[in-house]
Image (cartoon, rainbow, N blue to C red):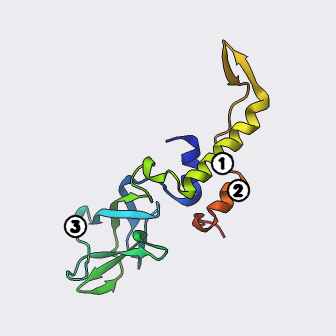
Amino acid sequence: MSAVSAVLDELVGPVVQRTVTGERHAGGVDRVCLRRRPVGSVSSVKVWQSGVSTTLTAETLSTAGGYVAELDPDDPTLLSGVLLRRSSWSTLCWESGTVEVTYSAGRYADTAAVKGSRFHTAAVLTLKSVWRGEEDTVGVVNDFDQPQTAIPTFMVPRAARELLADQLDMRGFA
């Protein structure tokens, strides 16, 4: 993953889908909020109590299950990252103990699918901005153009932030 991709992922959540394995959450709550959002799919949900795990099945419209993953209200092809504990078509609190989830987080299946999207445009703007700041410090070293100072790994221009404003991940901000 490039430095620009990592910065955009921090701002708006994963852009390209990747698997998050065994993310753990404390039980005893009314909902589990996955850390990497948006979510493409949930592979497995386990509840651990006293060293014993129970694997839960997803609830569907026709089958009662142990959990339901809420849809993303802005994009019904994705999940919001909120899991509710279910039993016999009713919502419960999660048991005390540990909830362990494996899931796929991100908006696009691969980098080729990102091309032409506003996320791609934001990445290009960011890369151009970073390089523009280094143009005056480029010198010739052993027949190659090289920046004379380190290129910063964190610099997102205002235009890129405004392009992605409705996607900014504001969890943890007051």
Q: The residue tagged with tag 3: helix, strand or loop?
A: strand
Given contact means CB atoms under 8 Å apart, are the residues at marks 1 and 2 in contact? Answer: yes
**Is residue 159 shown left or right of residue 96?**
right
| Amino acid type at image mark 1 | Leu
Residue placed furthest toward the left: 63
Say which amino acid is labelled 2: Ala
What element does badge 1 sit on? Answer: helix
Q: Is residue 94 above or below residue 159?
A: below
Marks 3 and 2 close (CB-CB < 8 Å)? no
* Mark 2: secondary structure: helix
Residue 27: percent from left, percent from top: 37, 71
User: How far is mark 3 from mark 2, CA to CA?
Assistant: 47 Å
Report the quarter where the C terminus lies.
bottom right
Q: Residues within 10 Å of mark 1 (few under 14, many from 20)?
A: some
In the picture of the structure, the residue carrying the numbered disc 3 is 54
Tell me the quarter of the picture where residue 131 sits. top right
Q: Which residue is mark 1?
A: 125
Residue visible at 60% across and 63% down?
168
- Please state which of residues 33 and 61 is positioned toward the viewer in this rendering: 61
Q: CA distance from mark 3 to mark 1?
A: 47 Å
Q: Nearer the viewer, residue 20 or 25?
A: 20
Q: At label 3, which amino acid type do we have?
A: Thr
On the image, the x and y values in percent for residue 40 come to 38, 63
Q: CA distance from mark 1 to mark 2?
A: 8 Å
Check residue 159 in the rendering and tell me which mark sits there, or answer none: 2
- Extreme residue in the top direction: 142
Q: Residue at x 34, y 66 (%)?
A: 99
Where residue 71 appears, as percent x and y from the top left, is 40, 75
